[in-house]
Amino acid sequence: MFLPHVPEATAELNHKGYRVLVVTNQACVGRGELTLDELERIHESMLGDVRAAGGEIERIYVCPHTDEEECDCRKPRPGLLIRAQQDFGFEPSQTWMIGDAGRDVAAAISAGVRPALVCAGKDPAYRAPNDVPVFDDLMDFARQISAIM
Ligand SMILES: [Zn+2]
């Protein structure tokens, strides 16, 4: 479920003073392949893995819709990021959205937060715009974030 080193990288980011949230497309719910309860249980287990590594993901925002539902929250749309911004009051220009796909970068740009790409993801053919920094994985990002801010 997690990309490589996510629990340890979350702990590293927390250690550097960053709060960590997750925004995720889960069209499998909209397609009826998974219930929201089942997804919740998977997420609880993931949060437990992060806690065991000494980190904390404070909230997981889910878009349960399919493309056909044309909601405002399925990435590349910025709805989940906007909701998170309203809930947590973070400053978009000081917030990073780290994703593994072009739609993550697009959602970040729409929401006014800073995009970063990790290549350990599922979209190796995607070429980020020039000004989007690229990292091997979330731990690589966590280690370098002080240098690029
Ligand atoms: Zn949605």
Image (cartoon, rainbow, N blue to C red):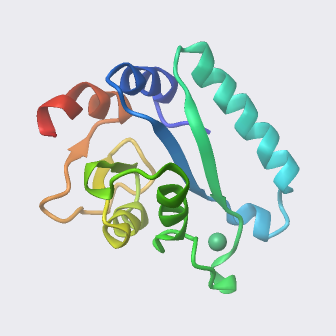
Q: Position of residue 64 (x, y in %)?
A: 71, 65
Could you say where residue 129 lies in the image, as x and y percent from the top left? 19, 65
Quadrant assignment, res 31: bottom right
Find ligand 1 in the image and state its quadrant. bottom right
Q: Residue at x 63, y 80 (%)?
A: 71
Give whichever of 107, 31 is nearer the camera: 107
Please name the residue shown 70% across and 72% down the image: 65
Position in image of residue 126 (x %, y %): 31, 63
Q: Quadrant of the N terminus?
A: top right
> Relative to 53, is 104 on the left or the right?
left
Left/right of residue 73 with respect to residue 120 in the rendered view:
right
Q: How many numbered dots are placed on residues in this image?
A: 0
Q: Nearer the viewer, residue 3 or 40?
A: 40
What residue is at 50 percent from the left and 49 percent from the top?
A: 88
144 vs 61, left or right, is left
| Residue at the image point whose x is 45% and y is 52% from the top | 89
Residue 145 horizontal/vertical position (percent): 22, 33
- Relative to 11, does residue 109 appear above or below in the rendering? below
Q: Nearer the viewer, residue 38 or 1?
A: 38
Among the 4 quarters of the image, the one containing residue 143? top left
